[in-house]
Image: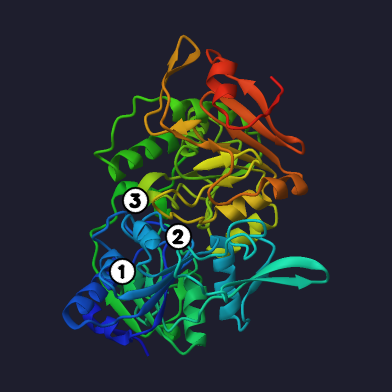
Amino acid sequence: MFRIMDAADAVKLIKDGDVIGLNSFVGIGCPDRLHDAITESFRSTGHPRDLTLVSSAGFGLFDPDRAAEPYIREGAVKKIIGGHFGAMPSTKKLVLEDRFEAYNLPLGPMSHAMRAQAGGHDGYITKLGLDLFVDPRIEGPGLNSISKDDSLVRLVEIDGEEYLYYRLPMFDVCLIKASSVDAKGNISFENEFTTVDALSIVQMTRRNRGKVIVQVDRVTSDFRRPRDVIIPAAFVDAVVVSERSAEDEAMGTLSGDIHVPTSHMDYWFDRLERESAPNRKVRTDSSADIIGRRAVKELRRGDIVNIGVGIPERVCAEAANLGMLEDIVLSVESGGMGGLPAGGLNFGAMIGADIICDMSMQFDFYDGGGLDMCFMGALEMDKYGNVNAHRGADQATGIGGFGNITSATHSVVFCLTFDTKGLDVAEEDGNVVIRQEGSVPKIVDKVRSISFSGKRAVQNGQRVLYVTERCVFQLTPDGLALTEVYPGIDKQKDILDRLPFEVIDRT
């Protein structure tokens, strides 16, 4: 039977050594008050400690002093198993300092493993991850020298074919952020931007006889319609009320409270971007705009599309500016489809979505080849067409949904600059002008870690493009081909002389 209690009492249900399942997506859906209470408890009592945190899609707030980051940094956590670390600025750096065990698994297999293990299975079997970093023959999921748990991902063979077997530790506790608790104790998500995998995580916790703790914005005396309930009262142990001010107009476009016609979506995209990052720097470099305008030309009427974070977000803006949103269907791996994916701190939400489903269901669609096209960013690409999108030199961001999306989509468009750290590009009279090259190359002989396998993409018959601010490459069975050079660019000086390998010239 659930009880409404304050956060300090709720986190007393967490014991030393517990495995905690967390339901959030990058920076949204974070049960921040519960994380704050864990920090307060650890600072005052030294408990709970030796915790294992498991999150398929990330659980930070882009602030090193909020959410779980303080108690992670101060030593309460011994292990993190996550799909994405991008919203945790201090944690993704501490990972590479061996401060705790850290493992990165693709978001899709983690989501599906939670659903499978909730249903009584021991894990989840898939081909997703073969030939990527998570494959035990390549690197495995460990992100630092002390992360040696080989039970999370194993190579198995069934009927002569190779698969990866993903298995997560069972949850002792789960922490969920929702909107309201009704008169009977049922939990609903009416003001949330996504449900992520809330029900699967709760069911997995209940299977293990664990404790379910839910943070809500409000208590209501109404009874919810059965279809509106995400977590039934019978599954809940503790409810913590952390009252929020009424959702403002902009946030209502992300929860679905406000209907947004396609003609207004570019306005809301720009407004949300300003409001989520009011002090953002004004860009003078035009690289992202150039890439976005070239990449959007790949879209075709009727396409179902996923667009990643970063430079690919410019494809959203360009599609809106061109009035293309009526002709295509955009989606995001957190569960939204239709509308326009929000960017920046709201990544994972959708402006004017037609549907928001559970994340595992979205990956059912993605893994089955349902996407026609995707636009994704990249930290590095190499001569084999491999892409690294999850691990930099000084931080581990994590692969997130990138692996699933790029492994099964028919046409994959990577959006990246030729180099970074100082790159300054302008457009003058229809020409691209490189005013200054960056000091760090992004096109390298061999990527640091593999998020996307060029070899497997060729085997799968996928069409793969690499759109930069000066040219376009295409992956072929014979290697990388240079297929387009933009006006104003000197092919030899600005491209070929700067590559660490030879490419096929098809310009």
Mark 1 sits on what residue? 72
Which secondary structure, mark 2? loop
| Residue 492, position as x, y percentages in the image | 59, 17
> Residue 32 or 490: which is nearer the viewer?
490
Decide if residue 395 is on the left or right side of residue 242.
right
- Residue at 36 percent across and 51 percent down: it is 252
**Labels 1 & 2 near each other (Cβ < 8 A):** no
- Residue at 44 percent across and 52 percent down: it is 349
What amino acid does circle 3 point to?
A: Met
Q: How crowded is mark 3: few (under 14 residues within 10 Å), some or many (20 or more)?
A: some
Q: In which quarter of the image is residue 62?
A: bottom left
Which label sits in the foreground, 2 or 3? 2
> Residue 194 or 167: which is nearer the viewer?
167
Which label sits in the foreground, 3 or 1? 1
Decide if residue 230 is on the left or right side of residue 9.
right
- Residue at 45 percent across and 30 percent down: it is 288
Query: Where residue 251 is drawn, which disc sits there?
Result: 3
Mark 2 sits on what residue? 194
- Nearer the N terminus, badge 3 or badge 1? 1
